[in-house]
Image: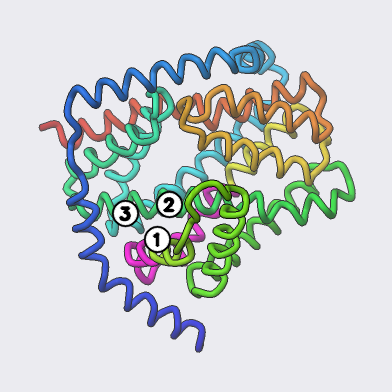
């Protein structure tokens, strides 16, 4: 009860800052000149083209596995689709809580369209977020709430996935007892439960987050002695954490649970893909492969980490004991549901938006 009161006091303090935060974010939205925007687009196109050329062999190898899909049992394909659907529902719930709306339609339509655009456009993350923001505003969501909510949801989503590899380290040190997907699923449940507990601690208390910031600051300054030292990183982390709390308000636990669920169901999709190809990998390294794929997906050089994820996931699955052919097919099956099928769903989202807000 005492801990809950402390959390409640903190939320009361930061919720009062929400109007100022939203105003600050909204005021910072300034459209760039057309020439500058064009130059930036051309630069991104060039970087994307070069990057895709470098990873093309791995990408084509994975895409070439499409003619082996008939090797996968239909039941596993249905399971992968259901797990990815559950992952999407968790993401929609997170955004709905962050934007402070009870309506599902604008969140679903805008997320599907924005996500699809981010997977095909150079520097797609920013472009997809801009499209989702515009669709939310068109649906009647206040501009400040849309900006603050999407920012908080993205920060929480990325923060959780970046913390996942750290919690995977003890699992790697321990190693797997049996080479089975059952153990891989059990290990994943433990790690994601620990991820929720650690994330809740960092959101609710100052000490651990400030300590992490201080250690990161010291490490960075030691590695880069020739540059000006980094200062006040702990305070900056606490400030960003408070901005997230200010946006989420007292429903931050539900938002955190939805965030962890979003990645847990995604991990389940990878396990289903491995089960579909009949693989028995090392459980601890399967989780490492998943972490590597999610970190590579955050690289903005190619949309959605296209090419980088395929190359990294295939390599780490092979390291986990999956045969070369099975690793390629499992990667294709996972990316089919995680990357490719959401693209046509973007058209569904755009049609949903157009049908309800035709003007």
How many residues crowd around disc 1 within 10 Å: few (fewer than 14), some, or many (20 or more)? few
Q: Residue furthest front?
A: 226
The secondary structure type at the circle numbered 1 is: helix
Disc with the residue nearer the chain's start (3 vs 1): 3
* Spatial CA span between label 3 and label 1: 13 Å
How many residues crowd around disc 2 within 10 Å: few (fewer than 14), some, or many (20 or more)? some
Position above or below: 19 against 285: below
Q: Residue at 33% x, 66% y: name it.
A: 246
The secondary structure type at the circle numbered 3 is: helix
The secondary structure type at the circle numbered 2 is: helix
The residue segment tinted magenta is 242-264
From the image, tell me which residue sits under label 3.
149
Position of 160 with respect to 236 (left or right) is right
Tag nearer the camera, 3 or 1? 1
| Colour scheme shown | rainbow
* Spatial CA span between label 2 and label 3: 10 Å
Quarter where residue 108 is shown: top left
Identify the disc placed on residue 240: 1
Residues 61 and 65: in front is 61
Position of 126 with respect to 88 (left or right) is left
Residue 53: x, y in percent?
54, 12
From the image, tell me which residue sits under label 2.
155
Q: Magenta includes 17? A: no
Residue 320: x, y in percent?
80, 35
């Amino acid at each position: 009860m005492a801990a809950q009161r402390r959390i409640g006091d903190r939320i009361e303090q930061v919720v009062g800052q929400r109007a100022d935060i939203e105003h600050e974010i909204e005021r910072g939205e300034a459209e760039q000149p057309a020439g500058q925007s064009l130059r930036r687009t051309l630069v991104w196109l060039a970087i994307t083209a070069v990057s895709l050329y470098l990873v093309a062999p791995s990408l084509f190898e994975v895409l070439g596995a499409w003619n082996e899909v008939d090797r996968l049992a239909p039941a596993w394909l249905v399971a992968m689709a259901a797990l990815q659907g559950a992952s999407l529902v968790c993401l929609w719930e997170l955004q709905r809580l962050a934007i402070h709306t009870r309506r599902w339609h604008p969140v679903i339509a805008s997320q599907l369209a924005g996500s699809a655009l981010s997977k095909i456009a150079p520097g797609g993350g920013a472009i997809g977020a801009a499209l989702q923001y515009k669709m939310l505003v068109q649906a009647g969501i206040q501009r400040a709430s849309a900006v603050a909510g999407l920012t908080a949801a993205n920060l929480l989503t990325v923060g959780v996935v970046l913390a996942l590899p750290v919690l995977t380290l003890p699992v790697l040190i321990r190693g797997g007892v049996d080479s089975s997907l059952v153990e891989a699923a059990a290990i994943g449940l433990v790690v994601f439960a620990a991820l929720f507990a650690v994330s809740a601690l960092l959101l609710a208390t100052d000490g651990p987050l400030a300590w992490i910031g201080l250690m990161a600051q010291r490490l960075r300054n030691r590695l880069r002695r020739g540059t000006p030292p980094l200062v006040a990183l702990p305070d900056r982390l606490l400030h960003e954490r408070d901005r997230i709390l200010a946006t989420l308000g007292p429903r931050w636990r539900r938002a955190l649970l939805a965030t962890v669920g979003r990645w847990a169901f995604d991990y389940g999709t990878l396990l289903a893909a491995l089960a579909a190809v009949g693989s028995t990998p090392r459980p601890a390294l399967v989780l490492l492969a998943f972490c590597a794929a999610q970190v590579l997906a955050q690289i903005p050089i190619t949309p959605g980490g296209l090419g980088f994820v395929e190359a990294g996931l295939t390599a780490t699955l092979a390291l986990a004991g999956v045969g070369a052919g099975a690793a390629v097919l499992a990667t294709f099956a996972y990316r089919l549901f995680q990357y490719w099928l959401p693209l046509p769903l973007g058209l569904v989202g755009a049609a949903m938006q157009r049908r309800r807000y035709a003007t």
